[in-house]
Amino acid sequence: MTIRVAVTVNGTEYARDVEPRLLLIHFIRDELGLTGSHWGCDTSNCGSCVVWLDAKPVKSCTLLAAMADGRTLRTVEGLEQDGRLDPVQQGFIECHGLQCGFCTPGMMMTARWLLDHHPDPDEAQIREAISGQICRCTGYENIVRSIRWAAEHPRENR
Amino acid sequence: MQVPSHVEYERATSVEHALSLLSRPETRVLAGGHSLIPMMKLRLAQPEVLVDINGLAELAFIALDGDRLRIGALARHADLLSSSVAGQCFPIFHDAERVVADPIVRLWGTIGGSLCQADPSEDLSAAFAAVRATAVIRGKDGERTVPVRDFHLGPYETVIGSGELLAEIRVPVRPGTGSAYEKVARRVGDWSVAAAGAVLCLSGDPARPVIESAGIGLTAVGAEHFVAAEAEDFLRGRAADEDSFAAAGAIAAGHCHPSADQRGPEDFKRHLVGELTTRALRRAAARASSEGNR
């Protein structure tokens, strides 16, 4: 049995017939071909699969695609706009916020959400915000610096 | 790769619709899904039908209604954490929510889902037991209320029957009350090794307050109904001071039933119960006093 799942992802509408048990992360990656979001621990611990569902970050390995039907998604592919990187993306470049890059899409989606709600977070707020996400390369130091860089370089007229 | 087994999916458009869908056998409510979906991946849960209630906005509220705080079952953890009215009436909820999972999970996981999951290590069950909350359960024949202290039948088991839905949690608000929650976990966002929640209602001379009533909830240590009943009884009518709080902590430690596991041996958990109960009582009393002076 399949059900129809229609979503808007990064401003583009998609519809697919899928099994109700399909997880949202696999829907995004395998059905829609948007492989920027990473499939990591499968247990909602690591946060590499974080995407926005109706403007809030979620761990997409722990939601069914069916739950997103009729809703709006934003993935890491939606950060860049009009050919310009989001300040968060630029911050990760400037401050070497990644090594292997596996956790990066989830980190950046959470960082964008944090900055949208707290444009000038201190280090403790940044660390709290990303506390549900795991990086095994950076020791988090450069991720925190990257997000601070983005806070200090907001895009005008966003 | 962890994938749930085959399941049917229904989306409820109203509470009545949800109740009619839930009358089918082997049906489970799908709210935040942050406990149910992992259990389905591991085949610890294998429902045949999921009823998604995430669209039921009428169950997503937190409001002060006269002398009670009402929390809709679909309110998210982040909603409770950011609710100033909930934090003013019951700081225990903010203490507890700060240590539930992580900020992303808290945006989607629900209060009702946590209670219905009935995980022995889950934080809100003890918090709601401490404040003597009442669960409001809807069924096709109407509404019934069950004290949260009678809500859990055991691990992963509640009084919610087939065709029923937890709709709301109600908490009585009393003046002169303070509350707090203290937890020890191995790392940020982890389940409790042990935790204690306390609520105190104080009366008498503000310089030497007396405990009118006490509520103590315990997490992850096998306390019956998540409650330290003997310690509560001990405190009633006593002075709200360090000696009483330490004695109550010792009683709570003696009467709970922790199991040795990867989070620690039994004697360590008992030690935590004693210390965390005492600390929670101390903070609850300080908050009750500051409220009385306002």
Image (cartoon, coloured by chain):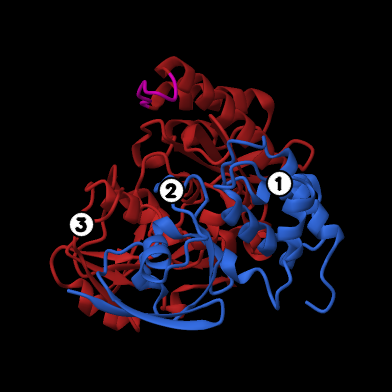
Chain colours: A blue, B red
Mark 1 element type: loop
Q: Chain of mark 3?
A: B
**Magenta range:** B257-264
Task: Give a yes or no on whether discs 1 and 2 share a subunit.
Answer: no
The amino acid at mark 3 is Ser
The crowding category of the residue bearing disc 2, from other C-alpha atoms within 10 Å (few below 14, some 14 to 19, many at least 20), is many
Residue receiving disc 2: B125
Residue at (22, 48) in percent of width and height: B43
Left/right placement of residue B74 relative to residue B86 reads left
Task: Give the Cα separation between the discs numbered 1 and 3.
Answer: 38 Å
Residue at (74, 52) in percent of width and height: A93
The amino acid at mark 2 is Ser
Q: Chain of mark 1?
A: A
Q: What percent of the width, then of the height, locates residue B4? A: 25, 56
Front-most of residues B249 and B220: B220
Front-most of residues B145 and B22: B22
Mark 2 element type: helix
The C terminus of chain B sits in image quarter: bottom right
* Residue B85 visible at all: yes
The amino acid at mark 1 is Gly
Residue at (47, 67) in percent of width and height: A34
Task: Give the Cα separation between the discs numbered 1 and 2.
Answer: 39 Å
Q: Quadrant of residue B175?
A: bottom right
Residue receiving disc 1: A97
The crowding category of the residue bearing disc 1, from other C-alpha atoms within 10 Å (few below 14, some 14 to 19, many at least 20), is many
Q: Chain of mark 2?
A: B
Q: Quadrant of residue B205?
A: top right
Front-most of residues B126 and B293: B126
The crowding category of the residue bearing disc 3, from other C-alpha atoms within 10 Å (few below 14, some 14 to 19, many at least 20), is some
